[in-house]
Image (cartoon, rainbow, N blue to C red):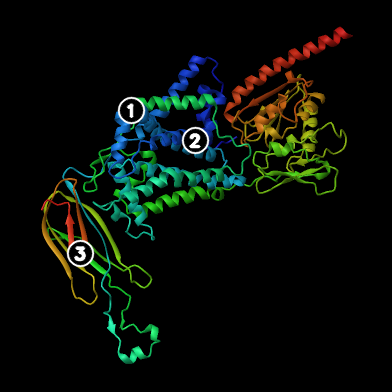
Amino acid sequence: MADIKNKPLRFLLQAINYSVFMGLIWYFASSPSVRLIADDEAKITIAFAHAGELREPCRMLSQEELNQLAPNMRKIDDCPRERSPVTFEAMLDGEPFYSETLKPAGLYEDGGVDLFYSAKIPAGTHRLSLKMNDSVRVEGFNHSFERQVSIDPAQILLVGFDSRQGFVISGTQN
Amino acid sequence: MIINPLKRVYLALESWFNISFGTEWNPLYHLGTLSFFLFWIILVSGIYLFIPFHGSLDGAHASVEYMTHDQWYAAGVMRSLHRYASDAVIITILLHLFKEFASGRYRGFRWFSWVTGIPNLWMVVTLGITGYWLVWDELAQYVAVGSAQLMDALPMFSGAMTRNFVSGGMTDRFFILIEFLHLLGQPMLLLFMLWLHVKRLSNVNINPPRGLAAGTFLALLALSLYAPAVSHAPANLGMVPREIHIDWFYLNVYPLLEYWPAGRVWILTTSVTLLLMMLPWLLPRKDGPKAVVNLDHCNGCGLCFDDCPFDAISVQARTDGARYEHEVVVNPALCGACGICAGSCPASNPFRTPRGELKTGIDMPQLPVDEMRRLTRETIEAMTGDLKIIVFGCEHGLNVRRLDCDDTRGIKLICSGMLPPTLVEYALKQGADGVMVTGCRHNDCYFRFGNRWTKMRFDGERKPSLRARAEHERIRLHGAAEPDRREIDQDLDDFRQQLRILNQAVAVAIVETD
């Protein structure tokens, strides 16, 4: 525990200590690097928010039913809040790679679903097939999409969904 | 004496730094203040960087590039200082954590400082994460997507957050929110937590010694000039960055997301945090009995209030009708049971009641001042050597009982700070030739100020002080941990020689007088 009285030696030792400290900082501030994707890989990302169809259709109330309601409560139709779960399936070159059924958000299951999925795929040309069911009143899938896509290495193929346009993809050459 | 292996590692590291930095500048004794100093560097450089920084998706990267390359000599250096000081603070915080754990300073009455300290580490880490975000380069993109994945794993977000980081999803508004968090929200919260962290301490110092601060700053400056911090390519949400040079001090959790779902990463980090926070109860240590005030002998002078390292003593209006204005009150929840208050009480004077029981204003039930006086007297009487040396030693430093031999006897105290200076004079009056006091290593007192207050009292710089007419040449102070046995043995041999010379001089003087 003895202090060194020789000042130059002491400062030299301090300089060594500071160098080790700074060396640690310098190295771990940027190394080792992390490889996120191989040279021949790309990524597919499926990301959208969507509200499924109402579980039951709106029903028009009869005049008799309307008469039983207070005058200020006489809304002509009755629309149950609950929405359908959303079932999604994706296939690449005929092979399924993602499948999920999401429950609507909310205590009464009257909200939408948020879908996010991301996976690495080989870069190049693929046959992409997407299917979705968003209504319990429909058998099978009521939305589908199939297309040949070509994707560069490190590129992100983004799959979205719009209620009016259906499936929308971006980040592909085709 | 068995020392736990972690403490042994810490003591070895401490010894090495004592050799090169000396006890005054040893960085291990100033990890807290060094962290504060690094925060100052981060704050000042951050304010400077904020001026040319363009807080928008389109402008952020370009403005950082301008600072880094076009203005490398000013803003570029500031950027590097900002980054490297931020990295350095993680090291000082981790060392601080290790030191407190290895030396057992995390449990018992210290639980509050420990528990409030752990979240600070995470706060600093999240502050760094939002900082990396602001550069809006490929690393920022990686951090943004990873953070969003982590947030989405929490029930409140449920997948909505990550969609912000697909092509076209990120907006300036979100970016500005992150900017606000980094510049104001997180620093303010961190400041509050730091205040909470030191809430149960008194005489809090936030400045490291100037030499250590200067050395640290120069080292950071040299690193900033040698290896300036640089950015990756601009963020492109349509592409995956191929290779990322991540800052492992801040972003070490993110690579796990390549292998684990975000929920599992949360479980790991939360479990580690909770485990660390629960250590004071998982490895408990019972504090000794707390200090007790004896109002019959307390005049409310407040010296114990000044000296208490843990803010456990308050001075309040007198309640017992005595003629004094104040009395002191001990809060047992805060008391560290160190006994420094007993050493500071002017009533702890062994000459006050030579025959009867010595009662003092504030005392430790496990080792009252009266008991210390009795031990001192009986120990001196029991010694048979040609010299009589009493070594008062703190129980957290070197075990002084291992120094026992014909001419030397050790008396263990809770802390060297509990030794009233008058008891040293008492020992000399009772026939001791010399008195040595060993506390923890200098600047590393287990109870924060025990060895510092003792030295100041002995040097006449703090009340109650050792009288100037006391035989100072027969008194020695020595800071020592268990591995310093050889050094203290040498110091004791040197002390013996000095005492023999003094005794011979006294004998000659008596003969000449006769």
Q: Amino acid at mark 3?
A: Glu
Q: Residues within 10 Å of mark 1 (few under 14, many from 20)?
A: some
Q: Is the residue at mark 3 from the same chain as the one at mark 1?
A: no
**Which residue appears farthest toward the right when viewing the image?**
B514
Find residue B72 and name its label: 1
Which quadrant, please, contains the C terminus of chain B?
Answer: top right
Q: Nearer the viewer, residue B473 or A87?
A: A87
Q: Residues within 10 Å of mark 2 (few under 14, many from 20)?
A: many
Q: How many numbered circles are shown?
A: 3
SS under mark 2: helix
Q: Amino acid at mark 1?
A: Trp
Q: Choose top left, top right, bottom left or bottom right for residue B346.
A: top right
SS under mark 1: helix
Q: Which residue is mark 3?
A: A89
Name the spot of residue B342 as percent of width and height, x first.
74, 38
Q: Residues within 10 Å of mark 3 (few under 14, many from 20)?
A: some
Q: Which residue is mark 2?
A: B35
Q: Amino acid at mark 2?
A: Ser
Kindly identify which chain the residue marked by label 1 belongs to.
B
Q: Earlier in the sequence, mark 2 or mark 1?
A: 2
Closer to the eye: label 2 or 1: 1
Closer to the eye: label 3 or 1: 1
Q: Nearer the viewer, residue B166 or A115?
A: B166
Name the spot of residue B268 as percent of width and height, x first.
40, 51
Q: Residue at x 23, y 42 (%)?
A: B242
Name the spot of residue A18 as percent of width and height, x first.
44, 25
